[in-house]
Amino acid sequence: MTRALSFLRGLVHLWPVVLVFVAWDAWVVLNGYTSTVAPRPFPVVTDVVIGFGEYLPYISYTLGVALVGLLGGTLVGFAAAVVVWSSAALAGVVTPAALIIRSVPITALIPIIARIVGYGDPAVLTSTVLICFFPAFVFTLSGLAAIPASGHDLFRVLGGNKLQVLARLGVLYAVPNLMVSVRITAPTAVLAAMLAEFLMGAHGLGALFSESRSYMDMERAWGVALVATTVSVFVFLGARALENRVVARVT
Amino acid sequence: MSTSTIRTAQAEVDRPAARPGAAVTIRGAEKVFSLGRGRTLQALAEVDLEIAEGEFVAIIGPSGCGKSTVLRLAAGLDTPTNGAIEVFGDDPHRLAKQHRLGVAFQEHALLPWASVRANIALPFQVAGRRVDKARVDELIQLVGLVGFEDARPKQLSGGMRQRASIARALALSPDLLLLDEPFGALDAVTRRRMNAELARIWGEEKITTILVTHDVDEALILADRVVVMTGRPGRIRKIAKVDFPRPRGFETTRSPEFHDLVDELTALLDQVEGVDD
Amino acid sequence: MTAAARPGTAALFGIGGALLVVVAAQLVGQFQLAGRAWPPLTDVLAYVTTPAGSGLLLRNGLVTLTAAAQGLLLGVVVAVFGAALALVVPMLRPGFERFAAILNAFPTIALAPLLITTAGREDTPMVIAALSVGFVMFVTMTSGFANVPAAHSDVLTVLGSSRVQRLVRLELPRAVPSFFDGLTLSAPAAILGATIGEWFGAPKGLGLLLVSAMQNYQMPLLWSAALVATALSLAAYIVFVQFQRIAVRRFG
């Protein structure tokens, strides 16, 4: 009962979203736009609901690429951070470089990857992996760096090696950080996948979007925007739930 | 037993409240805090207290006895669950809105980005009045911060910060001054020096003052009356009149009478804490 | 001794790391390890130093920088105002927070068609930059406003302050370090947002340059445009980090 009530209260707090829809509708009507310029919200929502089957393959492709990229990038970033962490000199050299590479805007990275890997699926996947790699790397490394000296000393006294420190303490310190990186990169992964698809892919929401735009199917194009937003929000919520669960488990 | 007799006796004196000349009147004040999930904590149980205009009252008691709650009620920062509190015959909120309150906490709560002078000028700005530069300078002199006007709080020592905080509380010559353990975080030596300075400042300004402290000596050096509170829920255990002549220098604090009173009140606090555990 | 030596060592490692990246990039290009699409860095630099190249990059870089700066300004103003409004009118807060979270998850690319019809091709980069900035600033300002110590708040209550006075005298100055925190995160987001906007048919800008260089297989141009975009992003970040340090010292 209270659960249902708090759910309802949660819905009430979505009023800005409702406001956006109302403003959108009013804007189209007041400017007298035809549907080829800007469609009204209702036909767009109808297109999404009725044509959901047509959207589905595109959604699953984008979602798949984003998740694989997120998983792959995070794992590679974690592994790279552990390797780098085991050597202080290496960490000192690689971390600033990683920070600089992290500043490369996705919009600059994707065209270059497209040219190096070649147009198509591998380039889309490489882009998302690369974009998730750097945050995972940096966050893991900062987590490992936060292992207190006393922890290291304890294991030295007990005659443990670096691997044991990693297994016992590293997980404790790095995994929560890694999950933060997953939470903040998850929506970025979807964005990166869509950007890459838009630019070169034949699949996915980004491709559907550029396709419907060139056919002047504005309801479909705006529908893609709506669906992409929803997917992205759910990916974010999922990542946050995962973070909470993993952090509760580890700490 | 004795607690209840004291309370009845005191109630007989205090209940016909809001006499002319009463600055603060607390009648049957209760305060219950909600801890969430239906659990509650009773911080105060039926507190009656009357403070005359121009009087300095110290409230002492063990931590968690609700003495700060009494002060927060008088400041209008909390409202009683039951009972009533009047300050100069009015709601405490009204007094705050009329900018007639001064307050200093254990955490000095000075604005870290503002200089000493700007911090002392803050009450003028909040009241929408022109900053009275002469008054600010006078206060800086009064609390002995000449030469530190332009320093920022983190450049000052703990004692200096508390002096600035007290100067801020005095800025608008408030009708009621509320001090919540203002020297609680200071070392013993600095604390005694601050006690002496506060006594001197109070001697000059004669503002109705409530001081919350857990230091019996501090209460006896400064107050006209000392209210001893017991904990959980907070009740008034005893009200002691302090008749030592002012200024209360070493002759007073070294006198046997002073020590007897310290011992008596300390014993009360000990007893209270014994009961509490 | 060690305390003095440590920052020096860190800087040395940093320079070493940067050099490593540069040398590696050069070698990969030199030996065509990644194909023709990865030119040697020297080729890229040679292109940047040609008058035609530098002129093109400068013109488009300025367009992107302007769009990003305008977007940053707009996003910051709206977000700070929104956070302040949510603070003064607590009823609005949950709705604002949820909306900001949705905006954050919003794939900005999805906005492009809307914006091109509404804001026009010229202003789209600025608006996307503003949206990218808005969420970050809103979140940092909300948390900055929230960490006002209770004692400070009590003092202002007892002094009889109005809600607006509390905002001006306490919460706004208190949130200054958070404001600059937000800016360090927002500045790269603004550059990214502006370039995304430029992908969608803006008449000028680095984003346009990147897409057209890719499509026309102009590798030195593509790489140098990426280099300029990265440099802008990094420079904005470093500048705001300095501001943030000053702010923490002054208001912390």
Image: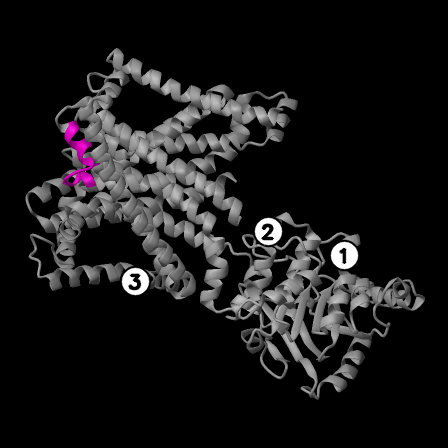
* Residue pointed to by mark 3: A15
Q: Are marks 1 and 3 on the same chain?
A: no
Q: Residue furthest top?
A: C31
Q: Earlier in the sequence, mark 2 or mark 1?
A: 2
Mark 2 → mark 1, Cα distance in angstroms: 22 Å
Q: Is residue A215 above or below residue A25?
A: above
> Which residues, given as a range, are shown in magenta?
C198-214
Q: Identify the residue at image location x=24%, y=25%.
A: C223
Q: In the rendered view, does A217 fall on the left or right side of A165?
A: left
Circle 3: element type: helix
Q: Please name which of the two marks, 2 or 3, marks the residue nearer to the observer.
A: 2
Say what amino acid the circle numbered 3 marks: Trp
Q: Is residue C93 above or below residue C227?
A: below
The answer to whether residue A114 is seen in the rendering is yes
Crowd tier of the residue under label 1, counting other residues whose Cα lies within 10 Å: few below 14, some 14–19, many 20 or above: some
Q: In the rendered view, does C219 fall on the left or right side of C3?
A: left
Q: Is residue B211 above or below residue A130?
A: below
- Chain letter behind tag 2: B
The answer to whether residue B58 is seen in the rendering is no
Q: Identify the residue at image location x=28%, y=47%.
A: C71
Secondary structure that dominates the magenta span: helix
- Chain letter behind tag 3: A
Say what amino acid the circle numbered 1 marks: Arg
Residue nearest the observer in this picture, B68 or A126: B68
